[in-house]
Image (cartoon, coloured by chain):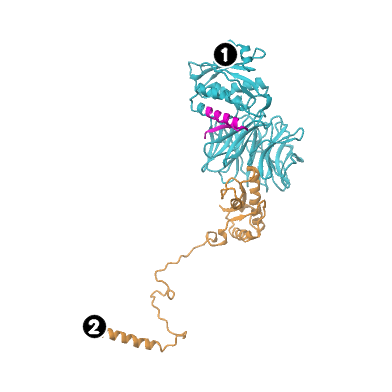
């Protein structure tokens, strides 16, 4: 299922830009990577991001027109989508060996300039070289070279975008990370894996029964999920490369909500083997089951904090659902959310400082973020049927499921709420997103 | 000649009728002519075929109460309503007399709210029915409560009618 990334801009002007960007992505996908498309993209800007946009120029890489993917188109699309860069329009083509006129680029408004080259090697691979310069300090910030297989050119472009993002913001980029999500089209459910920009879709699991709650392993090689193929919810772990599936939990009753411990050896899960839904910890091979919560009601949706010191979960012990945390060794749970009568789906940011969750207020299910250091709560979405938030591994974005035109779609919002994007499919529904970890 | 014969038949018929009328119509001992040579019930269609079920299973009677397999719940409610008591009791009685039979109770919710929390709420509806069966003597080994949450809606749509249809537990015989 092909997905398209659409920027959900706030003004009519930007909606127009968003449309232009969509067109240019479509062109890239079809392999008609014309120079004009690249130029249209350069005019793309996102409103509402404030003064923090870094002006950066990406010159065309000589030789890239002969490669299966136009590297700089992908790099520019990544940087534009991030919302933290202002791309400086230019029609220059500069290789990594070109002499750089820093003053000229500074005058054109670029604080940084990326150049590079693409050359086909005798063995069929492509030699991709890139350099990044600080035009203010007149200094090189980075230089990388890749011997890239033709089918990995997109990944190479994303890695260059990651490097630019990190060198200019100090934060690791997430353009080369992947996402997993579930699509439904007719009677067919698919667990799909794609690049963070929605391209490069691969099907990991196909089923005629629902698939929910996919969760990436910390090493990025496996996904745990709940499949209804046995006419009841059962937890599996699937190795994405080998296709090997491990049955993790198929106890009497329902087995759901798998969440990896940071060590990748254990999972927190929600089981009903002892009555209503409760949180348990189990080894990734299905051994060593241990009950973690003990109430007469619902305790579900466990999530380990990144430091492994807490398991956050949803509980109805106070009446409606609220978010609590407990030590993975057990003991008393502490309540975390207090605003609103329905707070579910806790997700902790990689730095452990922010809790993302879905809250129902006035009948709307919306994405919220709670600053755990000061208790400040912020609503991050304008949509009304939001579900399943997932942090990007650098903590700067949250992907979540929502509804668009009565169909399930995915949306991404920056954790400050300023930048919004949407991913839709051409047919069917897409839901249950999970953002994969950084990978080597 | 032909006319005469016809007249004679009509006449003899009239004589026969007169003879019959001498028998009292309400006389229970009046002889009843048995025209069926096989000795079947009086007045039955001689070509009728009636089925005999050996070990007939009331579970398969489309008119019986056991054909009712859905328990509906009110909004935000997880208790079996009185109107569904007879259904649960009938299934309990059946399961108690058929110890080899097993059921899965499948709980469902409407489509509002989160996937996993709704799965837990659907479990509450399944568990309510499971507990009711067990309280009526059904063995734990015969019944399993599972949830489909909002994943397998019977009614599509986002109106009250669809939501009400999906707030449901189904009794599925294995």
| Lateral position of residue B24 relative to residue B112, left or right | left
Give the vertical position of B3 relative to A263 (above or below): below
| Chain of the residue displaying label 1 | A
Residue B45: quarter of image: bottom left
Give the vertical position of A21 relative to A409 (above or below): above
Q: Residue at x 56, y 44 (%)?
A: A230
| Lateral position of residue A373 relative to residue A107, left or right | right
- Indicate which label's residue lies in the foreground, 1 or 2: 1
Residue carrying label 1: A96
Q: Where is residue A82 in the image (x, y as percent from the top left)?
A: 62, 27
Please state the extent of the stretch shown in magenta in the rendering: A1-25
Residue carrying label 2: B2
Identify which residue, A2 or B144, lies in the foreground: A2
Q: Position of residue A215 (x, y in %)?
A: 62, 35
Residue A40: quarter of image: top right
Q: Distance between the residues labelled 1 and 2?
A: 127 Å
Q: Do labels 1 and 2 share a chain?
A: no
Identify which residue, A332 or A190, lies in the foreground: A190
Residue A381 showing in the rendered view: yes
The tint chain B carries is orange
Q: In which quarter of the image is the N terminus of chain B?
A: bottom left
Q: Please tell me how crowded label 2 is: few (under 14), some (14-19), or many (20+) other residues with Cα within 10 Å.
A: few
Q: Position of residue A57 (x, y in %)?
A: 60, 19
Indicate the chain coloured cyan by its letter: A
| Chain of the residue displaying label 2 | B
Magenta segment includes A18: yes
SS under mark 1: loop
In the rendered image, the residue lying farthest to the top is A99
């Amino acid at each position: 299922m092909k997905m398209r990334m659409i920027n959900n801009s706030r003004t009519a002007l930007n909606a127009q830009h968003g449309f232009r960007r969509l067109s240019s992505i479509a062109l890239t996908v079809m392999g008609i990577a014309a120079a004009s498309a690249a130029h249209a993209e350069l005019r793309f800007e996102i409103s509402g991001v404030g003064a923090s946009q870094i002006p950066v120029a990406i010159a065309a890489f000589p030789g890239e027109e002969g490669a299966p993917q136009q590297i700089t188109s992908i790099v520019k699309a990544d940087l534009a989508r991030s919302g933290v860069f202002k791309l400086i329009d230019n029609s220059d083509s500069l290789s990594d060996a070109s002499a750089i006129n820093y003053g000229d680029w500074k005058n054109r408004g670029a604080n940084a300039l990326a150049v590079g080259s693409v050359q086909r090697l005798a063995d069929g691979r492509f030699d991709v070289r890139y350099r990044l310069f600080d035009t203010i300090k007149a200094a090189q910030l980075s230089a990388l070279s890749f011997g890239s297989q033709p089918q990995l050119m997109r990944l190479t472009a994303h890695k260059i975008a990651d490097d630019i993002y990190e060198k200019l913001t100090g934060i690791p980029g997430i353009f080369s990370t992947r996402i997993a999500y579930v699509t439904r089209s007719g009677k067919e459910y698919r667990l799909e894996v794609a690049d963070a920009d929605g391209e490069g879709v691969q099907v990991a699991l196909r089923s005629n029964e629902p698939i929910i709650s996919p969760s990436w392993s910390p090493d990025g090689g496996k996904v745990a999920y709940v499949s209804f193929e046995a006419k009841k919810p059962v937890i599996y772990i699937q190795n994405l490369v080998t296709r090997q599936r491990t049955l993790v939990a198929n106890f009497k009753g329902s087995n759901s909500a798998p969440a990896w411990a940071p060590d990748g050896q254990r999972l927190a899960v929600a089981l009903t083997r002892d009555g209503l839904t409760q949180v348990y910890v189990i080894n990734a091979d299905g051994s060593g089951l241990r009950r973690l919560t003990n109430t007469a009601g619902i305790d579900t949706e466990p999530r380990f904090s990144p430091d492994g010191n807490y398991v956050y979960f949803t509980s109805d012990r106070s009446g409606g659902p609220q978010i609590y945390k407990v030590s993975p060794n057990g003991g008393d749970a502490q309540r975390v959310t207090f605003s609103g009568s329905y707070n579910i789906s806790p997700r902790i940011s990689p730095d452990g400082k922010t809790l993302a969750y879905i809250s129902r207020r006035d009948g709307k299910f919306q994405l919220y973020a709670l600053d755990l250091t000061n208790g400040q709560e912020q609503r991050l979405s304008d949509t009304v049927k939001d579900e399943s938030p997932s942090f990007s591994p650098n903590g700067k974005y949250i992907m979540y499921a929502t509804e668009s035109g009565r169909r399930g779609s995915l949306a991404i919002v920056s954790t400050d709420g300023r930048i919004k994007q949407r991913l839709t499919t051409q047919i069917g529904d897409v839901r249950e997103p999970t953002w994969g970890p950084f990978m080597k | 000649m032909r006319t005469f014969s016809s007249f004679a038949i009509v006449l003899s018929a009239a004589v026969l009728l007169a003879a019959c009328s001498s028998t009292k119509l309400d006389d229970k001992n009046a002889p009843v002519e048995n025209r069926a040579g096989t000795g079947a019930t009086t007045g039955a269609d001689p070509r009728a075929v009636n089925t005999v079920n050996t070990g007939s299973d009331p579970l398969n009677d489309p008119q019986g109460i056991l054909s009712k397999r859905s328990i509906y719940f009110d909004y935000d409610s997880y208790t079996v309503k009185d109107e569904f008591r007879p259904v649960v009791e009938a299934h309990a009685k059946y399961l108690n007399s058929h110890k080899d039979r097993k059921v899965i109770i499948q709980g469902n919710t409407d489509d509002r709210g989160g996937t996993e929390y709704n799965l837990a709420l659907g479990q509450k509806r399944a568990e309510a029915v499971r507990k009711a069966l067990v309280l009526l003597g059904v063995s734990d080994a015969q019944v399993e409560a599972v949830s489909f949450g909002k994943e397998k809606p019977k009614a599509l749509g986002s109106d009250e009618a669809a939501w009400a249809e999906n707030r449901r537990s189904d009794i599925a015989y294995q």
